[in-house]
Image (tube, grey):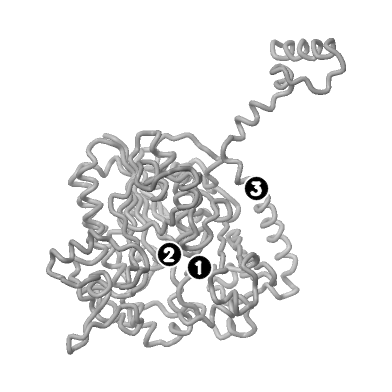
Amino acid sequence: MTKNVLFIMCDQLRWDYLSCAGHPGLETPHIDALAKRGVRFDRAYVQSTICGPSRMSFYTGRYVSSHGSTWNSIPLKVGEMTLGDHLRPLGVRTVLCGKTHMAADAEGMKRLGLAPDSTIGALVAECGFEPYERDDGLHPSTSYGKRNKNYDAYMKERGWDDENPWDSVANSGEDEDGNILSGWFLDNSDLKARAADEDSETPYITRRAMDFIREAGDTPWCLHLSFIKPHWPYIVPAPYHDMYPPETHSPVLRSDAEKDDPHPVFGAFMEERVSKAFTNDTTRSKVIGAYMGLIKQIDDQMGALMAFLDAQGLTDDTMIIFTSDHGDYLGDHWMGEKELFHDPSARIPLIVVDPSREADATRGTVSDALVEAIDVAPTILDYFGGQEVSHIIEGKSLRPLMHGQCESLRDFVISEYDYSMRQVRRRLGVSVADAKLTMLFDGRWKYVFAEGFRPMLFDLETDPDEFHDLGADPAYAQECDRLQALFFQWTRRISQRTTMSDAEIERRGVDLNEAKAGIIIGFRTEADLAAALAADKKRQEG
């Protein structure tokens, strides 16, 4: 059988909202079953805490400051190699069902004469994926975004004549009088969506993934099944809408101490509208009930998908990766949304099932190795037998961990965030160029470098909930200096020399290569050159 990869990504799924990760009120048996078949990486971190740049790091295997797509809708520049670019030469179809949040570099494509409707132009515009069905979600009834015409047509076939069924059916509910209430509003989150379960986004895109797998035949494939949920709008169809009453919810993680002279950037984010909305306990409870329902719906679809793979005879030859592009504060740390670097935002679920016999010894284990989202691309490339390209891909394959060949890959993880698009920047009076944050976490100390401000520092050994920022405490200045030195070391990496490998540079840089090619520099006479060449020949022969 041919090898395949099923690369599953949820949107805005927290690391701790799975029963295998210890959630007290949410059962996710099908996702848990994946963890029993593979390895659950308990300390996995994204390279940015917002959709677009995080996903570009997943797809390129590169840090945000390397690929340059620092925020949503900032295009991934033409020339950045993606997963599909690495896999297609190996004969692997690299296909998308769902979301990428990719913005095409239209100006760059135009400059290079790449027509968007050409074969290569379409791949460049779609982040290297063959778009079997792209649906980024977020289709309000305005000019924002690109609607999924396939889903619209499907809903019309199901009897919905709404102009925008994504907005008014899949992501809206009704009151007792039949008035349509939008799921965009947080206090409507406890309503059941107007769409039936089978017609909502998660089951629909799962079926489309199954359609591709049926059609793929014997050609090796890497299918990116990218769910839109549990990202907002937080609303879910029956029966999931009322499965999780408040007694099933995790308690909120926040402390009054966090509001006592907070770091200026953190304090400004706490003042954002979405953060203030989540301080209302009634609103928060409604949202979390829907959020848990959306996750339960995903888990049920995982059960259907795994049964389908079994029926197709593909399970034993398919690597499965289950993850998320970032988390969701859900009111923790007085925050809504994501964007900063507390674990509810920056830490993600990551489960990898490697069907290879070499991975048998680690099945069902939990790894505490520090891993990054950029490790997914090289893991997939490794599974298909591709060569390591460390001058391009900055992540590391997870397979040595899964095959018991090592216990760690790195000493620290990095996450970056560009807040120049946010009103926080304007309220703080920060320039576009300086509105950047970088988090470095070494397994105990979480350090955040904030341009123009003091650092943030958390000791997760003594303060696992990250309530106490030690960055302004003189007693921890030495720790900040140590971590800043690691950060400075990381910033000095060579990440833009992607057209030639270190091995090729080593080969070309051998002494006398230039002289042998006729570029004679530094020799006083022809006799000096002849003597040097003779000595070199003797060394090689001896």
Say what amino acid the circle numbered 1 marks. Answer: Asp
Q: Which quadrant of the view contains residue 151?
A: bottom left
Horizontally, residue 61 falls left or right of residue 197, namely right
Q: Nearer the viewer, residue 221 or 354?
A: 221
Q: Which residue matches tag 2?
A: 15
Cα separation between marks 3 and 1: 26 Å
Q: Position of residue 319 (x, y in %)?
A: 34, 45
Q: Nearer the viewer, mark 3 or mark 2?
A: 3
Q: Position of residue 10 (x, y in %)?
A: 36, 61
Local packing at callout 3 (Cα closer than 10 Å; few below 14, some 14-19, many 20+) is few
Say what amino acid the circle numbered 2 marks. Answer: Trp
Q: Position of residue 514 (x, y in %)?
A: 72, 22
Cα separation between marks 3 and 2: 29 Å
| Residue 43 seen in the figure | no
Q: Which residue matches tag 3?
A: 493
Q: Which residue matches tag 1?
A: 343
Up/down of 446 relative to 244, above or below: above
Which residue is pictured at 58% across the width and 79% down the height? 268
**In the rendered image, which quarter contains the N terminus?**
top left
Q: Earlier in the sequence, mark 3 or mark 2?
A: 2
